[in-house]
Image (tube, helix red, strand yellow):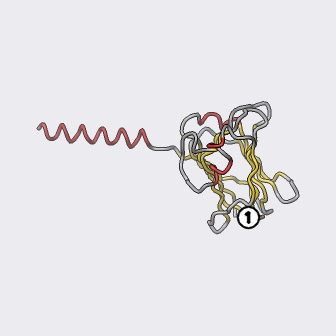
Amino acid sequence: MSNIIVILFVIIIVLYFINFNSVQHFEVHNETEVKIPVKTIRIENIPNNQNYLQLAQIVIKDIDGNNIVPTRVRASEPWEEASNTNKAIDGVEQVRSHPDIYHSKNDTNVFYELTIPPSNISSITIYQRDGWQDRLQAFQMLLIDANNRTLHKQPLSADPIQTYHYKK
């Protein structure tokens, strides 16, 4: 009888930690078809909102499911050198804590911008900082073409992992 109680106790503890350590993944399937190739992906403050931008990783996929590697990164000044702009594109696809993230120094007029070869994208996944996820709700993501026209604007959420899908 005591062995059964010990086994049940171990199962309860394991299930607790699996649930506690699980990360919620938010997905949006946009009805907007982005037909014109995207050249720039920009994350910026939503007007009249301010907060620090904290990004663990941004993953961009083309219509064949391949990663699109940015050719240029521009961003607001980082909090410190350890949390520089390259942290969000270093290939580590997971939620991470500070300083292994990009963290803006200021909370106003903040932006993070990726230039990519003009591409038809199928999805963008954003991994947030571990903790402080509510901050990303003050931001929006813009998809911009080579003529600097905004093709799509997406408010971001507080979810630790967010994937935005676009029609092919």
State the residue at coordinates (67%, 61%). Answer: 122
Residue 7 seen: yes
For the residue pair 88 and 7, the one nearer the viewer reads as 88
Pick out the residue farthest to the front.
81
Instruction: Examine the image and state in which quarter residue 79 appears.
Output: top right
- Residue 28 in sight: no
Q: Position of residue 82 (x, y in %)?
A: 62, 43
**Residue 163 picture location, percent across and down:** 61, 51
Badge 1 density bin: few <14, some 14–19, many ≥20, Cα 10 Å: some
Secondary structure of residue under mark 1: loop
Q: Residue at x 65, y 52 (%)?
A: 164
Q: Quick one: 21 or 75, which is closer to the camera?
A: 75
- Residue ID for mark 1: 120
Residue 31, image x and y in percent?
Answer: 71, 54
Q: Residue furthest right?
A: 147
The answer to whether residue 39 is above or below residue 46 is below
Residue drawn at 66 percent across, 43 percent down:
81
Q: Is residue 88 left or right of residue 3?
A: right
Q: Quadrant of residue 45?
A: top right
Tell me: residue 93, above or below residue 37: above
> In the rendered image, which quarter is residue 121 located in?
bottom right
Quarter of the figure that contains the N terminus: top left
Q: Amino acid at mark 1?
A: Asn
Of residues 103 and 138, the one drawn nearer to the viewer in this rendering: 103
Number of labels in the image equals 1
Q: Locate residue 93 relative to residue 10 in the image: left or right.
A: right
Please tell me which residue lies in front, 154 or 74.
Answer: 74
- Rendered location of residue 65, percent (x, y): 62, 66
Instruction: Left or right? Give the position of 23 relative to 136.
Output: left
| Image quadrant occupied by the C terminus | bottom right
Tell me the residue at 68%/62% (across/down). Answer: 69
